[in-house]
Image (cartoon, helix red, strand yellow):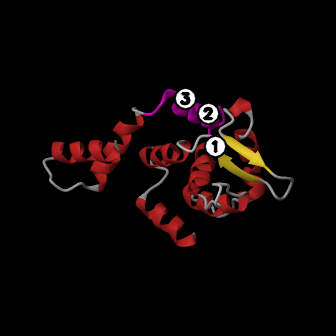
Amino acid sequence: MVSLYSARAALEEGSLTISSSAVKAGISKSLDQWQESIKTAYYDATRSPQPQHLYKEVLLACALAGVDDKSFFTAAAVRGPLRIVAERDDLDIPNFARHLKEMSEQRRGGILVREGETRRLRYRFVNPLMRPYVIMRGVADGLLTNEKRDAISSIS
């Protein structure tokens, strides 16, 4: 869907080349086409009355974190991407561990599965389609720029 909408956006711009702005437009358009359950789970996981909350940033960092063979990631794997996405070098695991825990509970939509014991916890998305959706939302919302993506790629 992203490629189709990106190509259409490029044609609407009068271009035969798909620019980054056309891709961004394609991502925005394709976000409307996702299953309602995915969109609702994202909303439940990231909504907060607190203006400076980090739920969107933490969830995006989870989607960008390195995973093992079973798609599990650790809090340590989230730390690097989160620092880049949130543009804050002072973020460490205690600053977002609560977010990970809450996102594995029903009141935040149970978007993550949490396994293991204290200090050995691993997480993964309940629905594997959530990972690409979260990344696309990050791009559409301006949380994930090309520069941030490149910086995250360099730490992986």
Residue extending furthest front? 69
Are discs 1 and 3 less than 8 Å apart at CB? no
Residue that carries the numbered disc 2 in the rendered image: 47
Residue that carries the numbered disc 3 in the rendered image: 37
Give the left or right position of residue 44, taking residue 36 as reference: right
Give the left or right position of residue 87, taking residue 7 as reference: right
Query: Between disc 1 and disc 2, whose residue precedes?
Result: 2
Query: Between disc 3 and disc 2, whose residue precedes?
Result: 3
Callout 1, which amino acid? Tyr
Query: Between disc 1 and disc 3, whose residue precedes?
Result: 3
Label 3 crowd bin: few (<14), some (14–19), many (20+), radius 10 Å = few
Give the left or right position of residue 36, taking residue 81 as reference: left
Q: Position of residue 80 (x, y in %)?
A: 63, 64
Residue extending furthest bottom? 154
The boundaries of the magenta stretch are 34-53
Nearer to the camera, 12 or 92: 12
Q: Position of residue 32 (x, y in %)?
A: 40, 32
* Closer to the eye: label 1 or 3: 3
Are discs 1 and 2 less than 8 Å apart at CB? yes
Residue extending furthest right? 118
Give the vertical position of 147 relative to 61 (above or below): below
Label 2 crowd bin: few (<14), some (14–19), many (20+), radius 10 Å = few
Q: CA distance from mark 1 to mark 3?
A: 18 Å
Q: Residue at x 82, y 52 (%)?
A: 116
Callout 3, which amino acid? Ser
Give the vertical position of 134 relative to 85 (above or below): above
Residue 62 colored in magenta in the image:
no
SS state under label 2: loop
Q: CA distance from mark 1 to mark 2?
A: 7 Å
SS state under label 1: helix
